Image: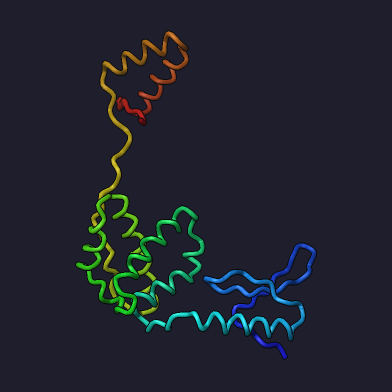
Amino acid sequence: MHVKLRYVERRVDHSGGERWYWHRRGHRLTRLPDSPIERMAVAERLNAAADSLAPAELARGTIGWVIQRYRDSDEYRDLSPGTVKYYKRFLREIEALGPALPFASFTRRAVVDFIESYPKAFQRRQSAAVLKNLFKLARYHGVVATDETAGLRLKTSRPHDRIWTDDEVSRWIDVAGAEDPHMTTAFLLLQLRRSGRRTFSG
């Protein structure tokens, strides 16, 4: 009889051979014996040890519960490494507000206060992005009815383009023309395409 073991995964290598692993979040990936009986014994032993270390399960609908569901989601696993780095930080700081508190305690005022507690604009944008994903998951599970992150007013970065002055354009054409006339031609064509707007990225 086939018995499904918790946190046990079957993987097939390039030659078609199968291997079994114990894969539990927060613990080291462990290769299991090929023998079904030995595999079951080792997996049960690993699970018993991990269960003794696991914190008490959080009640459904709490901040900690929503965060844990998000960490276990495919959406979180699909984040790029750079995004995960800052998501981990903000998830920890949201959880620190009180993992046992109802997620619905995140009123609009609480959301804005949390975001505005960060001094830099990019931090406020990042924290808002994390909260928005948590609210998306909470709404999916029926924990909240309203997305309190909708319509947030967040400062964006200044554009890198600025208008060139006539003097700057003239000086650039003089210098570029002395080096390579083709550069001047390309520059003037660009200005025509931009309908007289002289901009550059810097």
130 horizontally vs 155: left or right: right
x then y, percent, for residue 101:
29, 78
159 horizontally vs 19: left or right: left
Residue at (44% x, 20% y) in the render? 186
Residue at (39% x, 71% y) in the render? 67
Q: 95 or 159: nearer the eye?
A: 95
* Placement of 99 over or under 185, stated as above or below: below
What colouring style does the render use?
rainbow
Kindly indicate the quadrant of the structure image that contains residue 61: bottom left
Q: 53 or 168: nearer the eye?
A: 53
119 horizontally vs 85: left or right: left
Residue at (40% x, 21% y) in the render? 189
Residue farthest toward the top in the current orientation of the protein: 178
Kindly indicate the quadrant of the structure image that contains residue 1: bottom right
x then y, percent, for residue 7:
60, 78
Kindly indicate the quadrant of the structure image that contains residue 91: bottom left
Count every numbered label the image shows and give the total: 0
Q: 100 or 168: nearer the eye?
A: 100
x then y, percent, for residue 20:
70, 74
x then y, percent, for residue 31:
68, 72
Q: Where the C terminus falls, by quadrant?
A: top left
Residue at (31% x, 38% y) in the render? 159
Residue farthest toward the bottom in the current orientation of the protein: 1
